Amino acid sequence: MEIKTSRLQAWFSAFISLFILMSLGSKPFGWMRNAACLPHLGCNTGFFGYDALTHFVGGVALAIGLAWIIRRYPRLHIFHREFLKNVFVILAVAALIGVLWELLEYGFDYVRIVFFHMNLASPNQMAQAGNSDTMGDLFFGLLGSFIAAAAMKAIDRDIF
């Protein structure tokens, strides 16, 4: 079990590091803005783009991290014997974290507009650009978690 745990830990570390680097955006240790990738990838706001890739990688990191935590701390075991139930658990946790993340983005924009009176007339300057951005973020986070769960099961049949 220790070998599998260390392998999960290595994958989790890799994906969480990638997620953090992608989330930094154009400023070191700053918030990622939707327009940060516009000059490089041509993305803007909405369902696809750099923001979608960030949420996909975050979903992968979340699923691997959840599996690693449960393998590392057996008393936290929330998995079942059936694979589909485990996928449901992973997707439920990913959805919860995704919704909390979107609330954080909304709150970040709200504070900047209401309290700091920043002019955020362009959706590119907002963390929460609109409904299509929110739905895309949630979709790609869940997709990343689903693909990570399927990949972990394909690589190691005894993972959960």
Image (cartoon, rainbow, N blue to C red):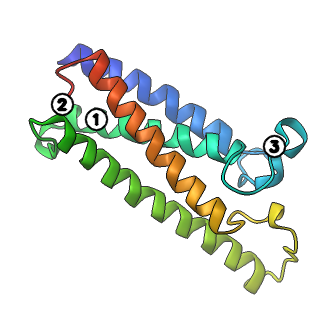
Residue 157 drawn at (x, y percent): 20, 19
Foreground residue among 106 and 134: 134
Q: Is residue 94 above or below residue 68?
A: below
Q: CA distance from mark 2 to mark 1?
A: 8 Å
What is the secondary structure assignment of the residue under circle 1?
helix
Residue 129 location, quadrant: bottom right
> Label 1 sits on what residue type?
Ala
Residue name at image x 21 percent, y 17 percent? 2
If you read the primary sequence from the N terminus, does the residue marked by circle 2 or circle 1 appear first?
1
Q: Residue beneath label 1, please? A: 67
The answer to whether the residues at label 1 and label 3 have Cβ atoms under 8 Å apart is no
The quarter of the rendered structure image containing the C terminus is top left
Residue 106 falls left or right of residue 113: left
Residue 152 location, quadrant: top left
The answer to whether the residues at label 2 and label 1 have Cβ atoms under 8 Å apart is yes
Residue name at image x 38 percent, y 39 percent? 146
Residue name at image x 43 percent, y 24 percent? 11
If you read the primary sequence from the N terminus, does the residue marked by circle 3 or circle 2 appear first?
3
Q: CA distance from mark 1 to mark 3?
A: 31 Å
Residue 128 location, quadrant: bottom right
Q: Nearer the viewer, mark 2 or mark 1?
A: 2
Q: Residue beneath label 3, please? A: 37
Question: Looking at the image, how many numbered discs can be counted on the residues?
Answer: 3
The answer to whether the residues at label 3 and label 2 have Cβ atoms under 8 Å apart is no
Residue 5 drawn at (x, y percent): 27, 23
Residue 72 falls left or right of residue 92: left
The quarter of the rendered structure image containing the N terminus is top left
